[in-house]
Image: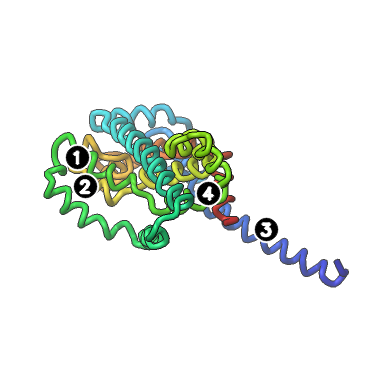
Amino acid sequence: MSDTSRPYRTHNLLVTNLLLGISALYFLVPIWWLVVTVTREPGRTFSGNGLWFDGFGLFENIALVFAEKDGIFGVWLLNSVLYALVAGAVGTLLSALAGFALAKYRFSGREVVFGVILTAVLIPKVLFTLPLFLMFNALGMLDGPLNPLTFLLPSIVSPFGVYLARVFAAQSVPDEVIEAARLDGAGEFKIFFRMSMPMMSPALVTIFLFQFVEVWNNFLLPSQLITNRWFQTVSVGLVTWSDSNGQVPAGTVITAAFISTIPLVVAFLCLQRFWRAGLTAGAVK
């Protein structure tokens, strides 16, 4: 490296670090404010400096959240966990099956099918809300015990998951291994479930995590399709409390929002070593 280029590279490094620092602050300051606010005593939510601690009332705030409105927040939280786990698991399995078939089987129209799936990635999901509402209404599923299925069934479909599964299956599952298994008498389902799925596990964990987060954060679909408030998700419930014109205290809403982020953090921390590999593989492809 010449002496003239060294100051230029040093300047670029400083600018890059400065921009990264500003970006980190932009995202971390709201999180810090949330953590500080939920630790304040009830009634002192917005008093004093909003970015520093003032007393300690975290456990009292949490108790108020779960006591509000007959403890419905706990039900919303469990509903979201159940919806996210079921939709994530089933959606990951369907994506893996479809992606593996598109990557490893030769059939007419394969690229057309894959093109349609890629097109579906580009269509905003909000456009499907009204057709889904009309369809489930015609089937009589907007009321009664089948109401949660109106949100679960559309949530298990993931075009991006199919894309990622195809990319990873093409890269990580050698054709020679599949042919050798067939010569040894293994069936297609055994080849997929016993051999291919372990090789695809980083991508499958990534797909599951994306599905989990998407279902957890989804607001429009459950707000329109789930009519029974005891079947609602935590995101819809939080908005309902926020729009209650003070019937639910602001401190309670903020604490509930803090609690609702904990499952996502736990999921990311537990699965980080898998989804990092899955994301890297997709990027390299």
Report, in whole angstroms, how far the alpha carbon at label 1 lies from the one at label 2. Answer: 8 Å
Report, in whole angstroms, how far the alpha carbon at label 3 lies from the one at label 1. Answer: 50 Å
Report, in whole angstroms, how far the alpha carbon at label 4 lies from the one at label 1. Answer: 35 Å
Numbered mark located on residue 168 in the image: 4
- Contact, CB < 8 Å: mark 2 with mark 4? no
Where is residue 129? Give x, y as percent.
24, 55
* Three-letter amino acid code at the position of disc 2: Leu
Q: Choose between 52 and 93: the one closer to the eye.
A: 93
Tell us which disc is closer to us: 2 or 3. 2
Q: In what element is the residue under mark 4?
A: helix
Where is residue 209? Give x, y as percent.
46, 42
What residue would you read off at disc 1? Answer: 147
- Contact, CB < 8 Å: mark 1 with mark 2? yes
* Three-letter amino acid code at the position of disc 3: Asn
Tell us which disc is closer to us: 4 or 1. 4
Q: Choose between 22 and 167: the one closer to the eye.
A: 167
- Left/right of residue 163 with respect to residue 157 in the rendered view: right
Where is residue 146? Give x, y as percent.
18, 37
Report, in whole angstroms, how far the alpha carbon at label 2 lies from the one at label 3. Answer: 46 Å
Q: Is residue 85 visible?
A: yes
Tell us which disc is closer to us: 2 or 4. 4
Tell us which disc is closer to us: 4 or 3. 4
* Three-letter amino acid code at the position of disc 4: Phe
Numbered mark located on residue 17 in the image: 3
What residue would you read off at disc 2? Answer: 225
